[in-house]
Amino acid sequence: MKTLIKNIKQLIQVRDHHTTKVSGLEMNYLPTLTNAWLLINDDKIENYGGMENLPKIEADREIDATGRMVLPSWVDSHTHLVYAGHREQEFIDKIKGLSYEEIAAKGGGIVNSAKTLQHTNEEELYLQSLQRLEQVIKMGTGAIEIKSGYGLTPEAELKMLRVAKKLQKAHPITIKTTFLGAHALPAKFKNNKQGYINQICEEMLPQIAEENLADFIDIFCEQGYFDLNDTKQVLEAGKKYGLRGKIHVNQFNSIGGVKMGVDYNSLSVDHLEVMNDEDIETLKGSETIPVALPSCSLFIKIPYAPARKMIDAGLPLAIATDYNPGSSPNGNMNLVVSLACIKMGMTPEEAINAATINAAYAMGLEKTHGSITKGKTANLMITDVIPSYGFLPYSFGNNHIHQVILAGKLIQ
């Protein structure tokens, strides 16, 4: 089936196959084509150009995009979308002044979510997660990474990953899965952290590999959670099963997690609210991309990742939602793009690059997603009638996505 989109005010993020990510000064350049057309053939982008050179095309469907922008769909490279229940009471407790430690002492935090998930059957978990997935699709997300980590037992972790895989069959959105068994220490292993690491590496990983449930492996490398030795063990174990790292580092402290990630050629290091000069130098010239999560900073009132410092040092940067029940209960990439501009000092061009082409790289999808490129998957957003692409982050908190096309299929 052929779909022709005509009279596009601006076709945004037009690139050839040579560009897999953009870094430093390159991030401030967003290639666009004014008064354009774009042709989709089945699930791929076939061709595009200026309206003045539109050839005669026999299309099965035509879309008039007068006054509208067309962009590649958002790529959300860091989420925990599969979880059970909510934690709004903890949100209220924080407003009333309770600390993280006090909330945890009451049974809150990740362990709270894990307990709820362990008692939620797979079908109910799927239905809750499907609702969230359909919400983010409507807001323009066309590819998404989903982590486990709210199970903390072999049965519950596998349940989460099976649900994430099942979600892929429900909609044409692209999903990658990440095993995050090392998200927190279960109460059962409170005084035996090595025992839990052993369970992850020797019991959970073989089952996950046998069922082909994960694309990546993750660990929360942070004081009070898992240290560098733990991280090394988990990344080594993942490597044996062909799982590349995508790891949580530097959320509250810089303890060497960035260097560990680079040493193991992790695809991404995520969070990075606390970055020192050594961390930035370590990332230079590596294949590991830094990923910032601004809506997490907004929600739990912690510093934002120093995006300006990283970009000015010549690094690439991706941004993602960190959609989860405790620290970022929001999957709106439009808001993330706005926060990147408002709170992290990024230009609209940098933020859009961070949410599309660089985010695709952070999911290992740079060859198929993240840009308007001939032969790439036709995952597109058609905006409302807006004055410029800068209006998207300017009009923060609003969804100006008029239509979504995933794998060539018109979703709305």
Image: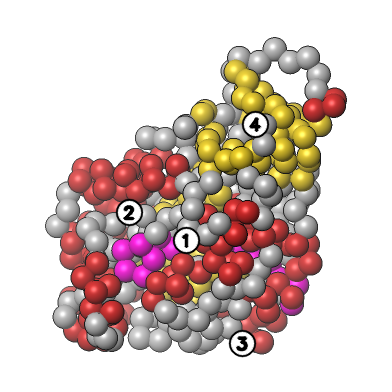
Magenta span contains residue 56: no
Label number found at residue 65: 4
- Kindly check if marks 3 and 4 are in contact, taking CB atoms under 8 A apart as contact: no
Amino acid residing under circle 1: Thr
**Residue drawn at x 56%, y 49% as measured from the top left:** 74
Foreground tag (2 vs 1)? 1
Label number found at residue 2: none
- Kindly check if marks 2 and 3 are in contact, taking CB atoms under 8 A apart as contact: no
Q: Quadrant of residue 407?
A: top right
**Residue drawn at x 71%, y 52% as measured from the top left:** 20
Amino acid residing under circle 4: Ala
Residue 83, given in percent of the width and then of the height, sits at 29, 57
The magenta stretch spans which residues? 313-329
Amino acid residing under circle 2: Val
Foreground tag (4 vs 2)? 4
Counting residues from the N terminus, which is met first, the one under dot 2 or under dot 1?
A: 2
- Kindly check if marks 4 and 2 are in contact, taking CB atoms under 8 A apart as contact: no
- SS for dot 2: loop
Residue bearing mark 3 = 276
Question: How many other residues sit within 10 Å of disc 2, few (<14), some (14-19) or many (≥20)?
Answer: many
Residue 187, given in percent of the width and then of the height, sits at 19, 77
Foreground tag (1 vs 3)? 1
Compare residues 25 and 398 and report the one nearer the observer.
Answer: 398
Label number found at residue 82: 2
**Residue drawn at x 64%, y 38% as measured from the top left:** 68
Label 1, label 3: how far apart the Cα atoms are:
23 Å
- Kindly check if marks 2 and 1 are in contact, taking CB atoms under 8 A apart as contact: no
